[in-house]
Amino acid sequence: MSEEAVRKETDAWFTLSGDVNSDMVHRVFEAVQDMTERGIDTAHVLVQSNGGYVSDGLCLYNFMQGAPIDFVMYNAGAVASIAVILFLGGERRYASETARFMVHKSHATASPGARPDALNIIVEGLRADDARTELILRRHVDLAPEQWAIHQYSDLHLTARDAKTAGLVTDVADFAPPRGARLRNI
């Protein structure tokens, strides 16, 4: 059997879109269970997400980092907010020329009339989330000081080329499953 034939049998191609939430976590868990049962070694995953819940994104990042499958992540449109952390769970990462990334600090809305003790709890939670996500960002991404400064107080937008320079992506390349490959949605 040729090397390419073996690769095709152990590689699989997926799309993953929508909000990063407990439903997405469940879908990824189920998909990885199926992959391990099928003997998949490498999962090529096209991600399209504007973000969601921090804890769910962190869970997916940590799960993918420890899973017995190599994840190759692709951005063909937009990967934003906590979805960037999920995206960083891939061993290799690619973005189409026209793709964009956005990272920012955590935010929340307090109930009208919230008491100071309730506001303090919200602030402490946001600070904890920011510390967890920034640890992962700094582990994988080498932003310029000006970019870190923007990230400190605002949304930081990165083009595919910016993302390559920062190490967020391995290269600028499109998600392109081989002809005849089965494409599954997670």
Image (tube, rainbow, N blue to C red):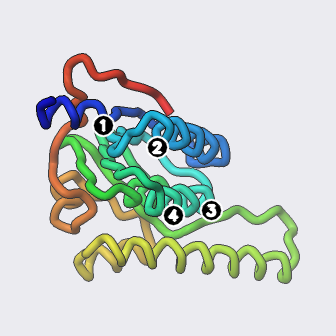
Q: Which mark is residue 11?
A: 1
- Whichever of callouts 4 and 1 sits on the residue coming sooner in the sequence is 1
Report the residue marked by disc 4: 62
| Residue 18 image position (x, y, % from top left) | 53, 38
Q: Residue at coordinates 35% horizontally, 73% vertically from top-left?
A: 150
Q: Amino acid at mark 3?
A: Ser
| Crowd band around label 3 with a 10 angstrom C-alpha radius: few (<14), some (14–19), many (20+) | some
Is residue 3 left or right of 24 when viewed as pictured? left
Q: Nearer the viewer, mark 3 or mark 1?
A: 1
Q: Residue at coordinates 43% horizontally, 26% vertically from top-left?
A: 184
Tell me the CA gap for discs 1 and 2: 23 Å
Report the residue marked by disc 2: 49
Is residue 80 left or right of 22 when viewed as pictured? left
Residue 81 seen in render: no
Q: Are marks 3 and 1 in contact (CB under 8 Å)?
A: no
Q: Amino acid at mark 1?
A: Asp
